[in-house]
Each structure stands twice: as C-alpha cells, then as structure tokens.
Image (spheres, rainbow, N blue to C red):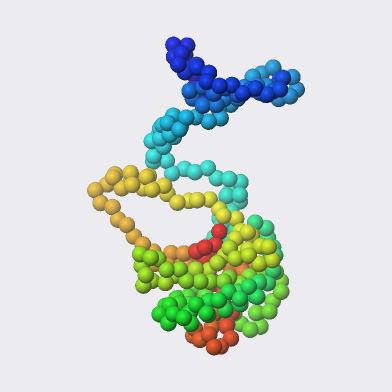
Amino acid sequence: MLLIGQDVPKAMICYETRQGSSGAPYAVRSPFGWTVNGLLNADGDCRVYSSFIGAEEKLDSQVARFWKLDSLDDDTKEMSIEDQRALAMMEDTIKLTDDGHYELAIPFKHRPVTLPNNRQLAEMRLHSLKCKLSRDRDLHEKYCQNMNELVANGYSSKVEKAEINRSDGIIWYLPHHAVINLKKPDKVRVVFDCAAKFGGTSLNDKVLQGPDLTNRLIGVLLRFRKKPVTIMADIQAMFYQVKVLVSDKDVLRYLWWPNGDYSEEPDTYRMNVHLFGNT
C-alpha cells in the first residue's frame, strides 16, 4: 500500500477514467497504473473499495526487485493444502530399511487407487521403441545397458507369471523411451513416461505433487560465503535411491525384452524405487 501526499501533485494526475452504469465501479488511470473504485458489495454498503490493477512496467519491476533483495536468504515457502497432505502421507509412511535406503508410499490423491489396465498402451509404445532401436545399433546397446543395470542394481525386478494378470485396479504399465543430452551425446538416459494417458487418465493424474523442498540457489550461494571452504557432492542415481512400498510397486510396471532381444516376447518388470518423471 502506498500513501501519496498532496505535495506530489504529479502523482495525482488522472490520465483517463472508465465509467459503467449508475452505481457500478469506475476505473481511473494514474501514473501508477489502473485502480478500481466502487462499492464493496451490492447490499447498499457505503464503504468504498479501491483495488490496484496494474502498474507501469518500470515501477512494477522496481518493486519486484526490492522484494527480491529483501528476502534473498529466505528459503521458506508457503505450502498449499495439497502440499501439506502429500507431506503428511510421506511422513506417515517413511521408514529406513535394513540396507540403508528410505522407503515411502506414493502420495496418491485417493486410496485405494483405481487404474485401468493399460498394458495395451505399453505394448504399442514398446513396438515403436523397437522400430527406433532396430535402426540404431549404438542406441540399442546403450539402452540395453541401462535396462540391465536397473535389475542388477535392484532398482527393478521381474514380475512372476502368476501375478501378471491381476485385475484389482492397482496395476499400471509405464512406457519408456531414451533421452539424450546434447551436451553429453554419448550418455543415454531411459525415462519412464508417467504422464502417458490411457482411458482418460495417467499415473501422474492420480498422484499429489507435494511441496517444492529445493533450497533457493541464492541462499545456497550466500551460505557458501560464510566459511573459507565449501564442499559439493553428487549422489549417483539419486532418483533411484528411495524405495516404494511393496503395495505400490505394481503401478510402476514396464515391459522389456529378455536381454534386449526384441525377437522374443517382452517380460514384465516393476520398479522398486520412486521414479524420475513421476509427479
């Protein structure tokens, strides 16, 4: 809010007014932008309501910059009701496993979750992937290496045949594809498409996003200046280090050929960890 004194007459100049019907609010454009003036409600209340609508870009940017400077080292963020729900679910289910990894539930919007069996979609996308890999031997080799490492490192496991045809609404198949960073053309990352839709829904549609807990970069940089030495570390395969509950694993199924041989029928696997790409 801003208080303008009469000793600044230029700030009082009225460039333009917009009027409606009798008793309706009216708008005034001043050097600071548009304001709307009028009754607070339609019940005869005589109080006057004035609302700032838009500022000139120069003033707006100056105020925004002032606010930024005033809170550079503030990492606090307000959480929505849904964010609070998601965080509560995580805190209620999180535990440390015997092998030193954290395990927590997928924060579904509603439990029990109900999903259509989308294996048909996964098979169609796998066929498209087959066409792509068959044209690029190098990509095929790197893709196979990625998929083999998922199983070898315990990030995923094969689904037994007796469990494949369950129909309890908690099965979902994730299509997957290769992503190549132009700055690292030799590295291939396999990404699971949690946003793929089938029957009008996707896995991401069923899951709460949760709060953004990332530290603001400006705060991190300022804290780096507090001591003479700073240390930066990297966690290998960070997004695969947190496990999902056993009851949630079957919504993270995917199809892949034995040893990458697409002349054979694909096997069914499920992820044991939370995924990069999931809401």
Farthest residue, direction left: 228
Give 180 or 146, whichever is nearer the viewer: 180
**Residue farthest toward the top in the current orientation of the protein:** 7
Could you say where residue 30 lies in the image, as x and y percent from the top left? 51, 22
Seen at 56% across and 21% down, the residue is: 16
Q: Is residue 231 left or right of residue 195?
A: left
- Residue lying furthest bottom in this view? 263
| Camera-nearest residue between 230 and 21 | 21
Q: Residue furthest right?
A: 43
Q: Position of residue 64 (x, y in %)?
A: 44, 34
> Relative to the observer, which residue lies in front, 68 or 170?
68
Q: Is 50 placed above or below 251 here? A: above
| Residue 273 visible from this viewpoint | no
Q: Position of residue 103 (x, y in %)?
A: 53, 64
Residue 227, percent from left and from top: 27, 47
Question: In the figure, is residue 209 to the left or right of 142?
Answer: right
- Left or right: 5 with respect to 37? left
Can residue 125 be seen here? yes
Q: Quadrant of residue 249?
A: bottom right
Residue found at x 48% / y 82%: 134
Q: Quadrant of residue 270?
A: bottom right
The structure residue drawn at horizontal position 58% and vertical position 70%, both measured from the top left corner, is 174
| Residue under the point 61% across and 23% down | 18
Q: Name the quadrant of the C terminus.
A: bottom right
Counting labels gives: 0
